[in-house]
Amino acid sequence: MIDLTLLRDNADLVRHSQALRGNPPETVDAAIAADRARREAQSRYESLRAEQNAKSKLVARAPKEEKAALVAEAKTLADQVKNAQHAATEASEAADAALSRIENIVLDGVPGGGEDDFIELRRVGTIPQFDFEPRDHLELGELLGAIDMDRGAKVSGARFYFLKGIGARLEIALMNMALDVALRNGFTPMITPTLVRPDIMKGTGFLGEHADEIYHLSDDDLYLVGTSEVALAGYHHDEIIDLSQGALRYAGWSTCYRREAGSHGKDTRGIIRVHQFNKLEMFVYTTLDDAEAEHERLLALQEEMLTSLGLSYRVIDTAAGDLGTSAARKFDIEAWVPTQDAFRELTSTSNCTTFQARRLDIRHRTQGADGKPGRTQPVATLNGTLATTRWIVALLETHQQADGSVIVPEALRPYLGGIDVLTPTQVPSGEGKTS
């Protein structure tokens, strides 16, 4: 959630942020009113409760002839306290609901608007050109014996798949390559839970408008995560962490699950938009002052990976309306997918400032001017994907050859046992023996 002091003292800034995201400014007025009503209801309850405690002491000390009247007064007061407590609870729930509609405050420079209003920051690499008709990643994956969508659907339904043979090795190679990059840059590797409690899922901001994309196990009241960001954000839930030696950096390797309920049939071919995939996610806890520099650092690591894989890509500054609830700024990296003649998102990195930490009560202790421990304040959290299953799409299509084989980028070869070319396990159509 946002800083309540900011909401109370600088409502115009919050209104501006909401407007950039495409949210009505009335949400801010409603949140301010609900916050005020909650404080007033809580104050009334606490005042009556204090009066009740004082009255109880009077009853205990009162002479016998005065006790009956005082007991009657105490009973009336007890009813008032009960009603005030109920009113305070209702006001608190109403305030929580109103505040949940206030998304993180976007940072200066973030473009306003929706999905198509991003700013392109740069393009890197040369868009591949072919002297043959390029195959899409699914056709290539089937030729290589790497992807089996039909049996995935048979076993689990639409948008599930098997990676087999070189396909399985390719994904593991990508993940291990990314893990090495993370280790070289001070990240602690983590294998994270993929089922989390509702308070952790809510705390990270994933139970908002896209809640219908999350799998929920109702019998256990647990959620399947769509990214290890959720578990890593919850790792220090309700803690005061030590940032005196610098940021805490984690690299979470996990399977991820998304219902993709809002995709409306988009990208249903192949493994671009699927219900289950693997991902290595960077997650950082740092101070608010260092958050923007850390964001650039995460972006640089992502670009290092994509460049070393020989992929052509562009970096975009995502518009406010496409940020998601928790992010104050998000950079997307979109790689060129030849058969779609377009850039498609492969990875992103978000600066969530203190929004998630306030919800999850994660703080660090500042240092006073005298060198002694100071007050606590919320940490900033950031996340960014360093490798995921979808990268196979751009990798296969970019490095394909006319015979259906795929050149392995040099940086990836050590993770594939030195293999430099992926070769088809079946003859491409139209290339069989002549009679």
Image (tube, rainbow, N blue to C red):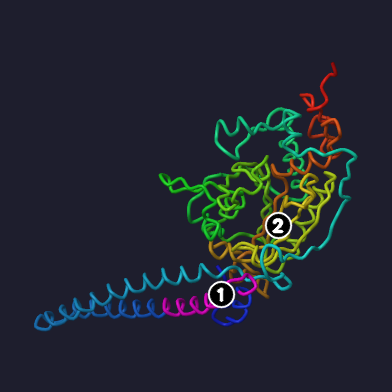
Residue 309 point in image, percent of width and height: 82, 44
Mark 1 Cα-neighbour bin, 10 Å: few <14, some 14–19, many ≥20? some
Q: At label 2, which amino acid type do we have?
A: Thr
Can the viewer see residue 57? no
Residue 266 point in image, percent of width and height: 64, 49
Identify which residue is drawn at 76% across, 34% down: 140
- Mark 1 highlights which residue? 24
Mark 2 Cα-neighbour bin, 10 Å: few <14, some 14–19, many ≥20? many
Q: At label 1, which amino acid type do we have?
A: Pro
Occupied quadrant, residue 283 = bottom right
Say which quadrant the C terminus sits in: top right
Side of 434 relative to 72 (left or right): right
Residue 225 magenta = no
Occupied quadrant, residue 278 = top right
Say which quadrant the N terminus sits in: bottom right
Return the disc, 2 or 1, that comes first in the chain's sequence: 1
Say above or below: 82 vs 120: below
**For this rendering, which residue is in front, 151 or 365?**
151
Residue 342 point in image, percent of width and height: 78, 52
* Residue at the extreme top: 435
Magenta segment range?
A: 19-39
Instruction: Give SS at disc 2.
Output: strand
Identify which residue is drawn at 72% across, 70% down: 111
Side of 98 relative to 384 (left or right): left
- Mark 2 highlights which residue? 349
Q: Main secondary structure of the magenta part?
A: helix
* Residue at the extreme right: 131
